Amino acid sequence: MHEVVLAGTPFSVQINFLSPLINGIANGAAYGLIGLGLVLLYKSNRIFNFAQGEFATVGAIVTYVFFEGTGFLPRMPGPDWLRYVLSALLGLVAAVGVALLTERLVIRPMFNRAKVVLVVGTVGVALLLIGVEGLLPYPKSQSLPTVSDVLHIQPFITRVDNIPLLYQDVSKLIMLVALAVAAFLFFRYTPTGTAILAVSQDATAARVVGISVERISLISWGIAGLLGGVAGILLAVPPAGSITPGAFTGTTLTVAFSAAVLGGMTSLPGAFVGGLSLGLIEAFAQVDSPFVPGLKNVHNGQAELAVFIVLLVVLLVRPRGLLGQET
Amino acid sequence: MAAETHVLAPVTATRKLDWSRLWPRIAAAVPLALLAVLLPAHSDTFGHVGAYAAIFVMVGLSMNVLTGYTGQISLGHQAFVGLGALTAANVVSTGITPADPFTFGIGIVCAAAASGAAALLLGAVALRIRGLYLALVTLVFGSVFADAIFTLPSLNGQDAGVSAYRPTVFATEYRYYLFALAMVLLCVYVDVWVRRTKLGRGLVALRENELVASAYGVNVLGYKLLGFTVSGAMAGLAGGVFAFWEQEFSDKDFTSVAGFNLAITFVVMVVVGGLANRGGVIGAAIFFALVSPISPVLQALANHTGWGTFYGNNKFYISNVIGATLLLQTVVMNPGGLGQVIRPFARWFRGHKFTLHDPDGDAGAGALEGSSVRA
Amino acid sequence: MSVLEVRDLTIRFGGLTAVDGLNLSVDEWEIVGLMGPNGAGKTTAFNCITGFYKPTEGHVFYRDRDVTKLPPHRKAALGLGRTFQNVGMVKSETALENLLTAQHTHTGYNAVKGLTGAGTVRQREKDLVAHAEAILDLLGLADIRDRRIGALPYGTLKLLELGCALATDPDVLLLDEPSSGMGPDESHELGDRLLNLRQELGVTMLLIEHHVPLVTAVCDYVYVLNFGKLLAEGDPEAIRNHPEVIAAYLGGEAPDALAETELPHDQEELAEVTHS
């Protein structure tokens, strides 16, 4: 417990500071990772992709299947870390593949329809993926090994005040930052990135200057699949994560959307900022604090309530989010 | 050539009943009506499933008002249904004894009122938010409302769940089905009169073009709120009927994963039915109720064809695949949904000649396409 | 008595002053024209008058009552009807449905009562349909009664939009380029229609128009805007020959150029032209 003193006032409170801080950042990294894919597709297609959570799950499932070997698939020989890397690569291929299929079969035919219809289409894709995943023969309640498991080291770097700082959480954070920076640079400085932005603003004009809208659309969705796959592989680990169909969609996705809105739906660094912020807000909302007596009574709902309030405030006061630009 | 002029005085039109055209349509409607009324009497299972279908139809009609008329999409409608159910159960709160008819009635009415109020609240809060962002807000609202309110210990009876026992007059499943059917007809009646009067017209106008609607005198803000309220009240009614159908349930039926599944099912139902198309939505609702994991229909079918155990183990995922496939097929290839498919029949029923060629295209796709719901 | 009066109307969007100190008045039963090159601020002024924009400065008076701040639907209820430049109707509905919607403020029952399907509601609905059909007949549009209007030609839509504006039972009609998309015959008919409407229904009108012969035939008084400011005002003849007005439109060409575009507006000349 830590004592927090409001400077200049006689108020001082005992709050457990560190635990929500660490949990908040860990969860926030999860929201950010999923959020990156959401922001990417909003930037490129101006839609909300409700299937992003399932791209993650597909990546995680395929990784698991190759790592552990299930049923007819034998375990690969070799050291753990090699198996993990290879399985992860295959998992990413699967995630990208699913994303490309979505683009081809659902998004492409509906290119000129209203955005809401496309969003409903992604809901359908999510639902279909959940169903298909569910029908596949693999153990659904399992999870992926953590980074520390694969490397056969202890799970936490150190304990701070008796709270473990996990390698997995640090990896999530590092990967999130790395991907956010890479994506940001990609959009700013590469011709393909610029082309994606051009197509999102005016597909016809982009065609006129020689950009292949079809190719660009495939590329954006491929990258989104890749981001989703990475998120899935890092997140489908104990205690909370698993390779259950629909796991990410039912829990993380909604908050990831709110995080993306908070950070700015058009800003990739915003996904990072929004994700961490929302993770922290959620964590601190659940703190048993005498400051806000009402919140304690909303049993179990504090975190979601906090998310909802943040979402509303952002949309009503500053719709473009913290780092986004006016569309 | 100068235009003719005359004073625009109101004239009351009269039309004679044309029996030769009327009787074939009556002849077509009667078997359907008989089916709806008599089939569920066959067995308790039939009655039970029939009431479930009725509940789905009410939810479908509720979403029809919101999405089809105001163009606002709701991804969290399960919250309103759940609120209705919990309200009814808590109002009645008789423990293990059956409710008396009067309290039962009050419970149902309160269910509709509570959800209407909640929807009004959501509408008021979200009025200035448009399009995709509003869809996101409804999604978050749905899960937040459910998780926050339904988990209040005072409401949800904690681990034991809540109970709402029907009055003894509904001792058989068939009788309760008839009650549910009556509620469905009430919702249809309201839906018909929404559509036929200034409320529906105002909602459709503001869905497509808020500026034009206000130039015609439509109070856009007020009507949107009214649309939300009517939609919420219908969903609450469905929830109330559900409470006494299931008789023992818990908040978990409407929160987190289960709640999310319900929300998605409802959206699929309305889209596949064809937006703003009453007949299509009713048909789709019945279909999805029948193929849902709760209903024994598919299980029976599977048992017959030897796939019984497979279905039994995977029914949840199978219903996902069915729903998703229909949704994608509708959205990508057949935007008018089921409504478009049955359109020639619906037109014939209303008195036009039967023709497969539709001169005007359909309004279903227009509900979302032409709406202010563009990001 | 002035039915509609605009005083010092100014509206600024950021650094751009779209309408600057406009003074305008329309008396009972007048048909007043509002002209000016594209971008002069005419539709913006309309939007201010009808409440779609909030003016930065100035006032709008309707029958001596300050209605500047009223929202559009309240102004419509008071009797200010309008049409839109890009044809504002509910495109996915039929002509009849649009005309019914337009009668929104005169249904005689409120929305909630409508839900009950009570007898009075049904009766009122029948009356509304009859009124709508009468308007369709008046404008010669009876054949499109049940057609979804989205696919209809532009000129027909403009005419139907006039019908919808009439259906709001207006005291003052603000028409935004009612003859746009119409050929010379149709514009001529429109002119006659407008004059008849004034005669039969006592409607006062304010028109945005580009079509000079229509303005000359129909308007009692004309205001000309340029770059948001009032450039000139007067009766149509005077405006037609006003050198500054012509310069604003044509960029300083010969004053007679405008006269050359005038079309015949009596029966004989019209017959000659159409049969040649």
Image: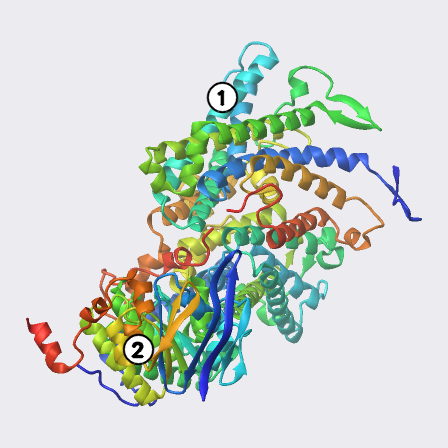
Can residue C57 be seen here? yes
Q: What number is the disc on residue A35?
A: none
- Which element is circle 2 on? helix
Image: C183 above or below C173: above
Q: Position of residue A29 (x, y in %)?
A: 65, 33
Q: Position of residue B70 (x, y in %)?
A: 47, 63
Image: B271 above or below C63: above
Image: A228 above or below A310: above
Nearer the observer, C234 or B178:
C234
Nearer the observer, A164 or B216:
B216
Q: Amino acid at mark 1?
A: Leu
Q: Residues within 10 Å of mark 1 (few under 14, many from 20)?
A: many
The residue drawn where x is 10% and y is 81% is C268
Quote the CA–CA distance across marks 1 and 2. Answer: 82 Å
Q: What number is the disc on residue C238?
A: 2
Can residue B23 be seen here? no
Nearer the observer, B370 or C114:
B370
Q: What number is the disc on residue A90?
A: 1
Displayed quadrant of residue A19: top right
Q: Position of residue A235 (x, y in %)?
A: 62, 30
> In this rendering, would B164 be left or right of B132?
right
